[in-house]
Structure formats: C-alpha cells, structure tokens
C-alpha cells in the first residue's frame, strides 16, 4: 500500500493543494488574493521536487495497469507543474486587477493540472477519457471566467458546446473500438489489433471518430473552429494556458495511444494523419496573415504549430524501411517544450501590455519606445515561433523536421519548412508595428518586478533551448525510452 501511495504522490499532493487554496480563500474572504497565488506556486514547486526525487526512473502501475508511472509520464507531469507555476505567476496581477474569486481561479488551474497528470499516466481508454473530460470542464469554466465580458461568455459557451460534441465523437469512437477488440487497455488493444489482417469499416470508423474527438482538443484542422473565438474571448492567462498546457496534455495522450495501442494498424491512419498535419499547418499559417487581433493571430499560429507536432505522430510508423520512431517522439516532445516556453513568453508580454478587450495589433505601434523590454520579448518569441536561428524554435524544429524526414516524409517536411517561412511574414508584421510605426502615446510603460522576473526567466529559457538544447534532449530521450520500451 505504501508503494502505491508513492506512485500516486504527485496526484494526491496536487489535489490536496487545490483544496487548501479553496479553504484559505474561504477564510480570507478575498482580502489577500496574492497570498493564494503564493501558496499555489510554493505548493507546486514542492510537489515538483518531491515527484522528481521519488519517481524518476521508477516504473510501476496501479489498478490492474490502467495507471502507469514511468519516465514518460513523469516528464509530462513535471512539464505540467512547471507550466502551472508559470501560468499562476503570469496571472497574479491580471487576476488581482480584472477577475473576481481568485481562489476559485487558482483552484481550477490546480484541478486541471491534476487531470493532466492523470492523463499522462493513463494507459486505458476510459481512464484517459475521464481525465480528459475533467480537464475540459475546468477549461470551460476558466474560458468564461470574466463574468463582465460578453466575449468571455461567448467563448465559454462556444467552447462547452463544441467540446461536448467532440467528446461525444471520441466516446463513440472508443465504443466502436471496444466492440471490435473487446478490451480498453492500450497494450491489450495492441495485441488484438496484431491479429487483424484486414481492416473492417467499423475499425476505420472508430479511428476516424477517435482522431476527430482528439483533434478538437488540439485544435487540428478541420476541428479548429472554436480556437480563435475562445482565444480572443477568454482571459489572456487562460488563453495562454489553453494554447500551451492543455495541448501538451492532449499530445501526451495522443503519443501514448498511437504508439502503444494503434501502431499495428498504422497503415489505416497514417495517410489520414499526414493530410491532417499538412492541412493544419497550412491553414493555420495562411489564415493568421490577415488577423488584426494579437490573440487571434496567436490562435492561428498555435494551430500551425499543432500541424508540426502532428508530424511526430505520423512518423511513428516508418515508410523508408528503417524505423527511427524514437527520433520522431524525441523531436515531438522537444518541440512541445520549446513551443510552450516561447508561447508563454509572448503571452506574458501580451498580458503586461494589453488591457482586456484591447488586443488589436495596431495598439502595439511604437511599443519599442514605450517599453523596450516588452518589445524585445515579443520579438524574440515570434522569431522563435518562426524557427529563426539562436532561438528555441530553430533547434526544436530542426530536430523534429530532421526526424520526420528520416522516416521518409520528405514532402511533409518540405511543406513544414514552407509554412515556417509563411509564418515569418505575419510575425514580422507585428514586429514592424512595434519598431517602425509611430506610438499612439509616448507614456512609458511601468512593469512590476514580478512581470520583469517572469519575462526574463522565459526569455532565458528560449535562448537556452536554442543555443544548448542537449541537456533537455537527454531528459527527453529517457522519457522516450520509456514509451518505446
């Protein structure tokens, strides 16, 4: 029993921390909201240290194998904890100024982190579905958290309606797959699919519904219709959270599901996923060009990034005769981390500059004169997202694209490079606005010490990954070995 509790240590502690924040909020009666953020940050930091100390290189499972603890799961749990710390720090001033019920807001973040951690360890379809729905419920509420904003209400309404539809598709796909193989654990599904010589229409239909349901969670084309409106209407810290952390959670499930369960029928989903990746990166980058709102531009930019990440799923199955899928997995995880750090930096700058509802790109005119730090952070972040040298995006894209090309997908890699060039155009439009256009006002922007500190750490992360990614690659390779094994 003691060993089981150690395996569940991160989840137990995060759940306890969430209830602690809610209880303290009830006692304080909203008098000291910053204290709640401090409790959440310190708690997540302690949980991160304890989890890595006790569970790294530990392999085990619970509940008849539906919950697995390995380096792959722990890598994502550490990513969620670190991202949660960053999001809470990014949210402090925004929450204190624009939102009510700070305790509930931080509590929802913590419960969503709990859901994502369970999702990373899920090795059974229903366990994964329940974890995914707990995450979705938290995000639905957070998207509509600005109660005095019609756009926020609209974002939450659209998100929950389309999310419910996507969940129904996913659950129907799971039921079809269960009807074919009679099991729900990933490894058992793998065994059953190995014995299938010809694909039935029911199997193809189940794969289509599962991919459609999960495609909504990551905003892949054509399941992306919710993303721009939700990104624009949700509170900006929530937008950053949805863009980075929730996508990482969905890819944690996608990667384990396709590599451990659905790989025997890769010939049934490989072409479809290739076209999905191509359409997602192309439409995301092309539609981003005419956007006039910075959050909508970042929404379509993130859709394009999803297309790049989907290439890693496609490359799980080799078409060149030499299986180097471990490179594809490592590349996907590396780009996920680089994209996450970069996007958090850009969104932090947006939070510091743009009041709610005033995120038009034209407002960034002359920002370099008013706040050189914010302008430089946005510039570094956008160059990184475009894949420019010396920044995180270049190193992570180079590794991912090389891995996908080595699997034989030269056409997909070429399309990804072309889309990276397209993305550079609309990123340069924002940069030109900040540095060339005359400012609307010459009043300098004053940034708090917390904002400057968070921005500095995120920029250092972007530069560190871009200039010396080897330590991170070593950690990711250990996580990859766990899922490959």
Image (tube, helix red, strand yellow):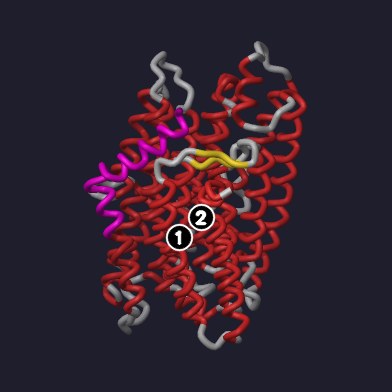
253 or 124, nearer to the observer: 124
Residue bearing mark 1: 47
How many angstroms separate mark 1 from mark 2 (CA)? 6 Å
Mark 1 or 2 closer to N-term?
A: 2
- Magenta region includes residue 409: no
Neighbor class of circle 2 (other Cα within 10 Å; few <14, some 14-19, many 20+) is many
297 or 248, nearer to the observer: 248
Point 34% across, 80% down: residue: 448
Point 55% across, 55% down: residue: 11
Q: Tell whether 70 sits left or right of 222.
A: left
Q: Answer yes or no: do the residues labelled 1 and 2 have beta carbons within 8 Å?
A: yes
Q: Note whether residue 313 is visible.
A: yes
Which range of residues does the magenta coloring cover?
A: 460-485
Q: Quadrant of residue 265?
A: top right
Q: Secondary structure at mark 1?
A: helix
Q: Secondary structure at mark 2?
A: helix
35 vs 50: above or below: below
Point 53% across, 47% down: residue: 3
Q: Tell whether 13 sits left or right of 372.
A: right
331 or 212, nearer to the observer: 331
Q: Main secondary structure of the magenta part?
A: helix
Image quadrant where one finds the C terminus: top left
Residue farthest bottom in this picture: 31
Neighbor class of circle 1 (other Cα within 10 Å; few <14, some 14-19, many 20+) is many
At which x and y percent is residue 416? 40, 36
């Amino acid at each position: 029993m003691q060993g089981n509790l150690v395996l569940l240590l991160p989840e137990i502690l995060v759940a306890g921390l969430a209830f602690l924040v809610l209880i303290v909020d009830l006692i304080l009666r909203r008098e000291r909201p910053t204290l709640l953020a401090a409790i959440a940050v310190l708690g997540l930091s302690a949980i991160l240290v304890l989890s890595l100390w006790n569970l790294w290189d530990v392999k085990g499972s619970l509940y008849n194998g539906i919950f697995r603890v390995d380096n792959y799961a722990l890598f994502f749990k550490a990513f969620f904890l670190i991202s949660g710390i960053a999001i809470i720090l990014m949210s402090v001033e925004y929450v204190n100024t624009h939102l009510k019920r700070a305790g509930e807001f931080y509590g929802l973040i913590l419960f969503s982190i709990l859901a994502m951690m369970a999702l990373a360890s899920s090795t059974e379809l229903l366990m994964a579905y329940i974890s995914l729905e707990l995450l979705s419920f938290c995000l639905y509420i957070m998207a509509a958290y600005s109660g005095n904003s019609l756009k926020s209400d609209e974002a939450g309404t659209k998100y929950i309606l389309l999310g419910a539809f996507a969940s129904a598709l996913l659950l129907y796909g799971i039921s079809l797959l269960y009807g074919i193989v009679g099991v729900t654990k990933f490894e058992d599904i793998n065994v059953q699919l190995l014995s299938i010589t010809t694909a039935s229409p029911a199997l193809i239909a189940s794969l289509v519904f599962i991919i459609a349901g999960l495609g909504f969670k990551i905003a892949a084309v054509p399941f992306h219709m919710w993303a721009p409106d939700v990104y624009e209407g949700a509170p900006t810290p929530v937008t950053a959270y949805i863009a980075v952390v929730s996508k990482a959670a969905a890819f944690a499930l996608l990667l384990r599901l396709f590599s451990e369960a659905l790989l025997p029928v890769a010939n049934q989903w490989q072409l479809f996923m290739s076209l999905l990746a191509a359409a997602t990166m192309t439409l995301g980058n092309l539609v981003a060009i005419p956007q006039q709102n910075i959050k909508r531009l970042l929404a379509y930019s993130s859709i394009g990034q999803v297309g790049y990440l989907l290439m890693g799923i496609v490359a799980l199955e080799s078409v060149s005769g030499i299986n180097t899928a471990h490179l594809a997995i490592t590349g996907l995880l590396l780009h996920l981390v680089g994209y996450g750090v970069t996007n958090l930096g850009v969104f932090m700058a947006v939070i510091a500059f743009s009041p709610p509802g005033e995120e038009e790109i034209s407002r960034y005119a002359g920002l370099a004169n008013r706040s050189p730090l914010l302008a430089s952070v946005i510039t570094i972040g956008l160059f990184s997202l475009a894949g420019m040298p010396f920044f995180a995006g270049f190193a992570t894209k180079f590794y991912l694209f090389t891995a996908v090309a080595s699997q034989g997908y030269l056409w997909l890699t070429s399309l990804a490079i072309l889309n990276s060039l397209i993305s550079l155009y609309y990123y340069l439009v924002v940069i030109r606005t900040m540095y060339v256009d005359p400012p609307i006002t010459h009043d300098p922007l004053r940034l708090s010490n917390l904002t400057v500190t968070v921005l500095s750490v995120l920029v250092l992360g972007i530069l560190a990954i871009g200039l010396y990614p080897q330590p991170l690659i070593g950690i990711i390779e250990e996580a990859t070995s766990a899922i490959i094994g």
